[in-house]
Every structure is written in C-alpha cells, then in structure tokens.
Amino acid sequence: MSSYLKNGTVTTDTLPSIVSYGTAVGRMEGDGPLGSCFDYVSEDSCFGENTWEKAESRLQQHAFEQALLRGSIAESDISFVFAGDLLNQCTGSAYSMRNNGLRFIGLYGACSTMAESLAMAAMFIDNGIGEYCAALTSSHFCSAERQFRFPETYGGQRPPTAQWTATASGCAIIGDHSAPPYIRSVTVGTIIDMGIKDANNMGAAMAPAAYDTLRTHFSNTGTCPDDYDLILTGDLGSVGSEILRDLFLQDGISLGERYNDCGLLIFDREKQDVHAGGSGCGCSASVLCGHILGRIRSGELKNVLFAATGALMSPTLVQQGESIPGISHAVHISAESV
Amino acid sequence: MKLTENEYGALAKRRSPDTKLYKTIPGAFVIGGLICCTGQLLLNLYSSAGLDKTAAGTLTSVTLVALSALLTGFGLYDKIAKHAGAGTLVPITGFANAVVSPALEFKTEGYVLGVGAKIFLIAGPVIVYGLAASALYGIILFITQAV
Amino acid sequence: MDYLWAFLAGGALCAIGQLLIDLTSMTPARILVTYVVAGVFLGAVGVYEPYAEFAGAGATVPLTGFGYQLAKGVREAVTADGLIGALTGGLEACAGGITAAVVFALIVALLFTRGDKTAKITGQS
C-alpha cells in the first residue's frame, strides 16, 4: 500500500512499472529536435477530421493505440483511463474515449495534467486497484488557439514571452512492478498564485508552483537535486525555467545541467517560430513518453523527477482581471528498484 | 515562497524579454504606410475615373476590405501581421481581418451560431464604441446648434 | 507627393499603435477602440479634416479615419435632419466599409477552409 509522508508526498510500496508508452504529434513537433522520438507524426494537422476538436481526440487515440501496441496490451485489459486535455469540459479526452467502453476518469490540471494522471494511475496500481491504468493527455495548437486566444487567420503578434501550444499527445500505461521505469513517489502540488496577470507569460505564472512542488518534494523525501539525473519541468518555457533557476539560486541551490524543461526540448526555438517554447498538456506528455521513458528503461537515465506545470486560468477570469494560479505535480520515475 | 508578490513580479519582469522595438516599430511603420499608399493609389484611380470624393473614398475602403478578406482566406494576412503588428491592425484592412477571421474559424459551429454570432467577436467593440461616440457627438452638436 | 504623405502619415499612426502594443499592456482590441473614439473626437473638434486634406489615404485608411467618417456623417445628418441625425449619420457614412466586411466575410467563410498556423501551406479553397 502507498504511504503518505506529509505535505502531498506519497511513496509507492510496490514500485509500479510504466509498462508501455506511446506518442503522437503534429507536423511542427515532428520537424522539431525530438521528431524521431515520436511514434506517430501526422503531416495533416486535422488528423483526417473536419474540426480541430475532433482532430485533438483523434491525435489522443493515436497516442493511446501506440502505447497499447508497444506493450502488446489488449485495450480491454486497461482497468482505468486517467485522461485530460485543455478543452472546455475536457472534451478532447471524453470524445477520444467515447467508443471504447473503458472506465474513464477525466482530469483537468491544464498543462500539468500528465503528471496528475501519472500520479493517479500509479497510486491506483500501487494499491492493487486494477490491472493496468492509462495516463493520457493531449493538446492541439488549433483547438487551443480558438478557445484561449484568436482565430487561426487573425493577424496578431505574439510577444516574446508567449508559448506555443504543442500539437501532441502522450500515453503511459502503468502496471504491476515488472521492468523499469518505476514510479517511486509523487508529490501533489498546491495552487500558487504570485499575481502574474499576463496570459502571454504563462512561464512566469507557473514557475513559483514548480519551485514550491520541487522544494516540497526534496524536503519530504530527503533528497536534493543532485540525487536526480534529470529534473524535468513541463512547459515553463525559456522565461519560466530561468525564473525557476533564479528561485532555487536564492536558496543557494544551483539546478545546473541536470535541469531541463519540456517546452524547451520539443521545439527548436532558433528555427521554429515558437517564442518562449512549447506548452500544452501534450507537450510534457509527448516529451516524457517519447524522449525520457525509453532512456530510463534502457538505464541511460537512473532517476528522473518529472514536474509538469499548469496555469489554471480561463479567458473569462483573465478578462475579469484575475491573476493566474499555477500548479505543479512531481513524479519520481526511476530505473532502480532498490 | 520567500518573495512577496511585488518582489516576484520584479523578478518575472527581469526574466521576461521585451519586444524588440527596433524591429516592431519599423515593421509597423513601413507595412502600415504601404497599406495607406495602396489606399491612396485606389483613391486616385477612382477619382480619375470620375467618381466624386465620397464615392471614391467608400469604394477605396470596400476594395481594401475585399483585398484583406482574400488574404485572410488564403491565410496570408496573419503571416504579414506577424511582422507588421499594428501596421496591419490599425488600417481598415485590420478591421476586415478581424471580421473575416472569426467568420472563417467558427464555421464549424454552423452558419448561424458560428459564423453569424461570432463574426463581430473581435471587431464588435470598434463598432459599438465608434457608434456610441458619434451619437454622443451628434447630441452635443444638436444642443450647441440649438443654443 | 500624395503617396509620400499617405505613407508617412499612415505609417506614423501605425507606429503609434505599435508603441501602445509593446510598451503598455493594452490589448489590440482596446487600441482599436481607442483609435476609433479618438477619430470621432478629432473629427468632432475639426482637427482631422485638415489632416485628412493633406495626408489623404494616410488619414482615412487607419481606423482613426473610420472614427472621422462617423463624426463627419453625424455632423452632416444633424445639420440636415436635426437630432435624429445623431442616430443615423454615423452608420450611413460608414455603411460601405462595414457591409463590405460582413459580406466578404460570409463569402470567405463559404469558399475557404479555415486557416492553420501550424501547416506549411495554408488555406486552399
């Protein structure tokens, strides 16, 4: 049974395994530095559908199918699906899962949803609930733009701090302890709002939440950044990750080379016009499932602290002049079983 | 967090790169200027074709709106706007783009509740406050003329 | 010569708009509203008319010109028809531009597929 340490940190008892994972992305992500890591790249941003919303659901289905395929797992063996996306009422996930008859738990944590779903799935399995649990998230640039910003053909300029929603999806399937990667512990974050109101500067809005969750995780588990080969935040982008480094430096801790951010990895900021980097539920999901989990499985990375971050805002609240609350959840994924 | 909101705001501001004014201002100036030159060309053309000043002006606006609608349809207006910023926002072509782009975007929600209802999503405030200001001016003018 | 003035005057109005975007937290929609209302005001106090005389399209194509048209229309209608002109003059003067935008928007919505900023080539009909 999982044990609750304190302040949101839960350690797993059985060390559940991430038994399989799959990814699907759009053209720009396929052209990016991690292009070859992804299982499915679509040149068609509509994924054969006639609306962006359906395109996102189709994209999510591709990632789910790739994960089933890689692990040779039958769809019917999935006991619970923890899925989320950025769309209103979580429809990207609901519509992608509407025909498969699986037990569905919809989650919303903005861009932090991959860590949220991974944590939930791991805790379910660790406590013997279900055979396999899937953690699955997606985002689509076009469906996110029309909901959060402007129509595609509207002529607007993005400031340098703006991030680019990745058209991407990632799925991890958690099962009983077998081969690595293992999920050792998770820290569920608190909502932190430091008064940032600029919806074009999500990195700055989310960085304090990442700082708080990481610091809490280190202190609760008695670890320090040096104990990890990689500390990977989800979608802070260039602005947010610089701020996160600053916040740790104020504590006298240098994150150094072992720190990276999914939003910086998925795109080439020099060649691709994405300003501060990638964002979206699918960004951290696809980077984790496409680029990181395989390297943990092979033993190249031993201990990874994955801390996806989310900006829990809506256009309505931003228009009402409210500041943007951030959240971050951390998941410790390890190649070591002792 | 040891920082207060103000201290954090200052840190965030320090780490947030500013827009490169040496790029955006000339971009807006040149492209905005060129759109106005196109307007002047059309105005001169229609005037030399014998139209009176008001008709030529209206036809110039209509032509620019049509050109902008076409560029928006082909997905080119936003590509220009990326470099032009206010240069494509402030001219009447920007108004047209603000009307056409939601119409195109929301047609998946149908022609009535999508296209029809969302067409003034962005440009609506311009018409609302433009008309309100002009009506206010009309009332003031009427009173001053009557006095 | 009128092209040069149109370029400089129109360019300057756009450059001011860009400064507002970059240096203030004003959203594009707020800037446009400000421009139109400023155009109505400048038209009402009689400043915009002489400016438009020498700047030509450099004054009428930017959205301040839209405001100026509204003010001019209202002035003419109030002078001719009295108070009712305050409600009719503005829209009458700008009817062409607004109706054109709506009609062309409908045509584009009918004929084109929606845009996609992530695609290499966009928007074929």
Image (cartoon, coloured by chain):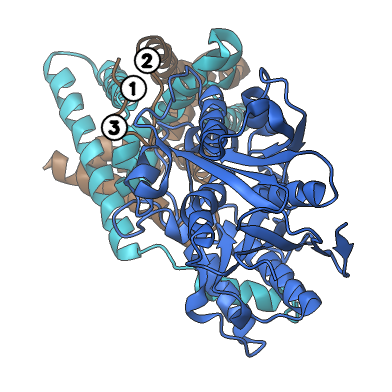
Q: Return the residue nearer the eye: A238 or B62.
A: A238
In the picture, the disc for residue A41 is none
What x and y, as percent, mark residue A175?
70, 46
Report if the CB atoms under discs 1 and 3 are less than 8 Å apart.
no
Mark 3 secondary-structure assignment: loop
Q: Colour of chain A?
A: blue
Per the image, the residue denoted by label 1 is B73
Per the image, the residue denoted by label 2 is C108
In the picture, the disc for residue B76 is 3
Name of the residue lying farthest toward the front: A178
Above or below, A94 against A214 in this view is above
Q: Is residue C77 visible?
A: no
- Mark 2 to mark 1 CA distance (whole Å): 6 Å
Q: Colour of chain C?
A: brown
What x and y, as percent, mark residue B35?
24, 37
Report if the CB atoms under discs 2 and 1 are less than 8 Å apart.
yes
Q: Is residue A283 left or right of residue A333?
A: left
Which class describes the residues within 10 Å of circle 1: few (<14), some (14-19), or many (20+)? many
Q: Quadrant of the C terminus of chain A?
A: bottom right
Q: Is residue A257 visible?
A: yes
Please identify the quarter of the rendering in which residue A98 is found.
top right
* Chain under disc 1: B
Q: Colour of chain B?
A: cyan
What x and y, as percent, mark residue A106?
75, 35
* Chain under disc 3: B
Q: Is residue B97 left or right of residue A312?
A: left
